[in-house]
Image: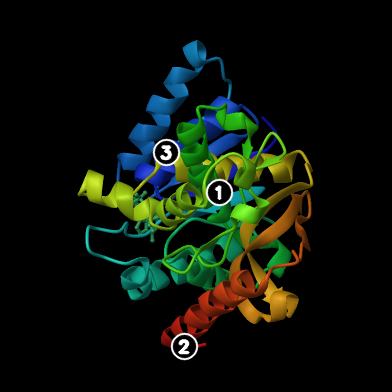
């Protein structure tokens, strides 16, 4: 294959991302981890599934960052996952060190790549990654909004008994307790959900979406979600590779849009071959705007812990 994607971190999110990428069959995959043998073993295992899963993608596992050389996209999943009772913010200091060292390696070995950040706390780690690589902001973005919106879509589908693929949802803000699900921009086959369910049910679904990651952490007890986060990351890779100009929510750098400046936060973007090609400004109502501003305020505060 002539395209190459590096996945940093061969844990739950990283290995599942490598699996979905191989199945998408659009690039070879390099899986990098610091633990000796784990990325190599998982890479070989995934490559060997190719003949029956119908893909030709090779998945190479490695402990050497130099192997990410010439990658078109790097997906950053390395870091500690949440444990029960831990907020995404608790992960801040630990994952910040990992992001910084990985960012330096990405800059060195894959200087032309796009970087999709998945490590939490997402919006802060995406900011940190952009600073560590020094890449243009359109080339560094965070995967969170796609995950949050597919969670909301799944809940709507489960509630109404309609096809998952007919649902659309928009979720803005930080990937955490301050996330802002937007029922006004959520539809089933173009029909606003307000026409299909009661206010109470819409609120319940928005609330469940907001704590969607925590619900899974509580169930798993030993880690956090990985199937849907991995699937969401692959969707973003596809948008870049195929220049899809896909309108989706992502953690992007704002320079005054929505009245917010100098942070990464979840907003609708157009994703294509140049990365974040456009930030779409929705006409938010008063309470939606206030919720987004409050979310931004939290992240501004947390950025100070990282020395910004
Ligand atoms: N370079 C490469 N890999 C690293 C590094 C590093 N500097 N530091 C840690 N890792 C690896 C670990 O060895 C581990 O294999 O990252 C992997 C993380 O895997 P898991 O512990 O299974 O965590 P996972 O569930 O995949 O979550 C990873 O994604 O969704 C977020 O909150 C989640 O921040 C977490 C990240």
Local crowd size for mark 3, using a 10 Å CA cut-off: few (<14), some (14–19), many (≥20) = some
In the depicted structure, whether residue 86 falls above or below residue 259:
above
Q: Quadrant of the N terminus?
A: top right
Which residue occupies the foreground of this view, 281 or 40?
281
Residue at figure coordinates x 44%, y 58% from the top left? 210
Q: Nearer the viewer, mark 3 or mark 1?
A: 1
In the depicted structure, whether residue 291 falls above or below residue 214:
below
Whichever of labels 3 and 1 marks the residue nearer the N terminus, that label is: 1
Say if disc 1 is inside 8 Å of ligand 1.
no
Instruction: Indicate the position of residue 234 as horizontal and vertical percent values.
Output: 57, 40
Q: Is residue 205 among what the camera can see? A: yes
Whichever of labels 2 and 1 marks the residue nearer the N terminus, that label is: 1
Instruction: Indicate the position of residue 288 as horizontal and vertical percent values.
Output: 61, 69
Residue at figure coordinates x 35%, y 76% from the top left? 93
Local crowd size for mark 2, using a 10 Å CA cut-off: few (<14), some (14–19), many (≥20) = few
Q: Is residue 70 among what the camera can see? A: no
Instruction: Indicate the position of residue 268 as horizontal and vertical percent values.
Output: 69, 58
In the depicted structure, whether residue 297 falls above or below residue 165:
below
- Which disc, if any, is residue 304? 2
Q: What element does badge 2 sit on? A: helix
Whichever of labels 2 and 3 marks the residue nearer the N terminus, that label is: 3
In the depicted structure, whether residue 245 falls above or below residue 306:
above
Q: How is colour applied across the structure in the image?
A: rainbow
Residue at figure coordinates x 52%, y 52% from the top left? 199
Instruction: Indicate the position of residue 290 as horizontal and vertical percent values.
Output: 59, 77
- Which disc, if any, is residue 149? 1
- Which disc, if any, is residue 227? 3
Distance of label 2 from label 1 (alpha carbons): 28 Å
Q: Nearer the viewer, mark 2 or mark 1?
A: 1
């Amino acid at each position: 294959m002539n395209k190459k994607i590096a996945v940093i971190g061969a844990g739950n999110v990283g290995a599942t991302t490598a699996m979905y990428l191989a199945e998408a069959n659009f690039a070879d995959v390099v899986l990098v981890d610091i633990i000796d043998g784990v990325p190599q073993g998982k890479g070989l295992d995934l490559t060997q599934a190719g003949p029956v899963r119908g893909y030709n993608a090779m998945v190479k596992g490695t402990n050497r960052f130099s192997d990410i050389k010439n990658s078109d996209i790097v997906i950053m999943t390395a870091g500690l996952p949440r444990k029960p009772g831990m907020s995404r913010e608790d992960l801040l200091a630990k994952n910040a060190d990992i992001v910084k060292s990985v960012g330096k390696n990405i800059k060195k070995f894959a200087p032309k790549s796009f970087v999709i950040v998945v490590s939490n706390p997402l919006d802060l780690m995406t900011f940190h990654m952009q600073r560590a690589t020094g890449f243009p902001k359109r080339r560094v973005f965070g995967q969170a909004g796609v995950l949050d919106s597919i969670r909301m879509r799944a809940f709507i589908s489960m509630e109404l008994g309609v096809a998952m693929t007919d649902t659309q949802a928009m979720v803005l803000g930080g990937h955490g307790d301050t996330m802002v699900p937007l029922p006004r921009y959520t539809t089933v086959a173009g029909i606003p959900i307000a026409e299909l369910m009661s206010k109470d049910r819409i609120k319940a679904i928005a609330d469940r979406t907001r704590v969607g990651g925590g619900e899974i952490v509580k169930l798993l007890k030993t880690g956090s979600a990985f199937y849907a986060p991995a699937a969401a990351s692959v969707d973003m890779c596809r948008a870049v590779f195929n220049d899809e100009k896909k309108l989706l929510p992502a953690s992007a750098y704002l320079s005054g849009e929505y009245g917010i400046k100098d942070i990464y936060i979840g907003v609708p973007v157009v994703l294509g071959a140049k990365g974040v090609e456009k930030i779409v400004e929705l006409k938010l109502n008063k309470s939606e705007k206030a919720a987004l501003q409050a979310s931004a305020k939290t992240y501004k505060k947390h950025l100070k812990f990282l020395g910004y």
